[in-house]
Image (spheres, rainbow, N blue to C red):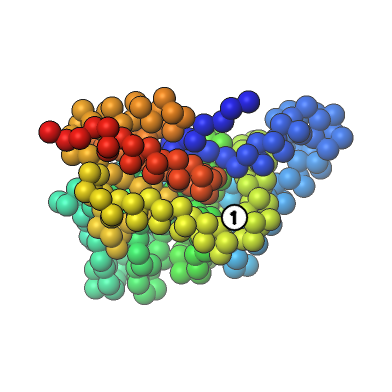
């Protein structure tokens, strides 16, 4: 067996230990005589898995008791509609901080359902930083404020939690959830597609304060109504059973390492290795402002599109996969989520040095 270092932004690497556990249990999950993929979601053996997944996530993120955890489908993108359908319910107004492509998509989707204001944006600077805001940035009668906490494509992350006063703060955390501790109580709702840092694609996790549920628009599709999902313990219909099982194993893996404080320490060490190298030389350019740098997605360019292409191609041949930047921005992007080992980043930096030496710029 040979495993590569996969720098994909998502779906992305899963911890080897988790994959081994999946393999071990593939044909016969703990004496049940079947794979988790084959089980009824209503069976006692599966009930234990989903309950355990929720308990482990609550423990890991220290989720307060007045928050519900929902295991849904449809990806983070479905939440771009579900959020306004559920939460734009008092004044039909919502404020969005647009700090990248996904927050832009979320904002655009929300305009279908009410009065949406862009409270702040860094679009004019090609999203190279996260805009600063304070309470005065938001309309007092907004039903919620929406942010994307880590901007996967541009490689930026909020260096602060916006102060929205009493207005519920909603955060898309698809590409940074469980990478470090966050104070859940500062948010009305957190959502994340699982395929970046938690599980295979197909699962979306929603963490929502209970009092925000139950006031959805009347015409909301039942599948998007958080209250329906919460009342049915995420089993109004068939949940993404296998993904939830893998997520549970990932939560256990992190708890076994020492929890989110330890995970943050490991992630900081990986990111520092890469950023310190980027700051020490002038062959590669890191376009993101230092204060807004993401610990999960690191973007850089050579300044020459042909060299960028060559870089990704030669890195690939050495087992450093998926380093090509997002199609909309070009350059390179190294996604170094929880499951990326330190050695993977070491190998990448070694390769970057070699490449710079072998490919002098004209
Ligand atoms: C990947 C990503 C999305 C889109 O997720 P899907 O699950 O593909 O819908 C949305 N927001 C962020 C921050 C992402 O990284």
SS assignment at label 1: strand
243 shown above or below 121: above
Q: Residue furthest left?
A: 362
The residue at which mark 1 appears reads as 69
Q: Quadrant of the N terminus?
A: top right
Quadrant in the rendering for residue 162? bottom left
State the count of labels. 1
359, 267: nearer the viewer: 359
Residue 55, given in percent of the width and then of the height, sits at 69, 57
Q: Residue furthest front?
A: 357
* Residue 111 visible: no
357, 315: nearer the viewer: 357
* Residue 252 visible: yes
- Tag 1: Cα neighbours inside 10 Å, few (<14), some, or many (≥20)? many
Which residue is depicted at the point 34% across and 40% down? 352
5 shown above or below 249: above
Q: Is residue 287 left or right of residue 227?
A: left
Which residue is depicted at the point 68% across and 56% down? 256
Which residue is depicted at the point 58% across and 50% down? 70
157 shown above or below 74: below
Q: Is residue 339 left or right of residue 162?
A: right
149 shown above or below 341: below
Q: Is residue 166 left or right of residue 114?
A: right
15, 326: nearer the viewer: 15
Which residue is depicted at the point 49% across and 64% down? 182
Residue 203, given in percent of the width and then of the height, sits at 55, 40
């Amino acid at each position: 067996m040979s495993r590569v270092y996969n720098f994909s932004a998502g779906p992305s690497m899963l911890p080897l230990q988790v994959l081994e556990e999946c393999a071990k249990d593939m044909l016969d999950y703990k004496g049940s005589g079947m794979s988790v993929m084959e089980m009824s979601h209503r069976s006692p053996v599966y009930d234990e898995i989903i309950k355990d997944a929720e308990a482990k996530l609550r423990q890991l993120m220290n989720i307060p008791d007045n928050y519900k955890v929902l295991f849904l489908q449809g990806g983070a993108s479905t939440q771009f509609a579900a959020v306004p359908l559920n939460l734009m319910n008092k004044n039909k107004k919502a404020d969005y901080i647009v700090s990248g492509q996904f927050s832009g998509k979320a904002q655009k989707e929300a305009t279908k359902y009410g009065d949406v204001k862009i409270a702040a944006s860094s679009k004019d600077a090609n999203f190279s930083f996260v805009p600063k805001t304070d309470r005065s940035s938001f309309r007092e009668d907004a039903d919620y404020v929406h942010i994307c906490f880590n901007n996967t494509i541009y490689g930026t992350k909020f260096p602060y939690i916006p102060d929205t006063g009493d207005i519920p703060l909603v955060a898309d955390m698809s590409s940074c959830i469980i990478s470090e501790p966050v104070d859940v109580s500062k948010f009305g709702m957190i959502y994340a597609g699982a395929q970046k840092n938690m599980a295979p694609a197909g699962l979306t996790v929603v963490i929502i304060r209970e009092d925000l549920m139950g006031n959805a628009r009347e015409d909301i599709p039942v599948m998007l109504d958080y209250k329906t999902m919460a009342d049915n313990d995420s089993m109004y219909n068939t949940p993404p059973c296998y993904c939830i099982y893998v997520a549970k194993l990932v939560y256990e893996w992190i708890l076994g390492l020492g929890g989110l404080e330890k995970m943050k320490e490991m992630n900081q060490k990986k990111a520092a290795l890469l950023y310190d190298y980027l700051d020490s030389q002038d062959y590669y350019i890191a376009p993101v402002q230092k204060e807004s740098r993401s610990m999960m997605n690191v973007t850089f360019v050579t300044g020459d599109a042909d060299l960028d292409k060559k870089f990704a191609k030669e890195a690939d041949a050495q087992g450093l996969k998926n380093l090509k930047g997002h199609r909309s921005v070009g350059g390179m992007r190294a996604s170094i989520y929880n499951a990326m080992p330190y050695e993977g980043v070491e190998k990448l930096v070694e390769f970057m040095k070699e490449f710079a030496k072998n490919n002098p710029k004209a």
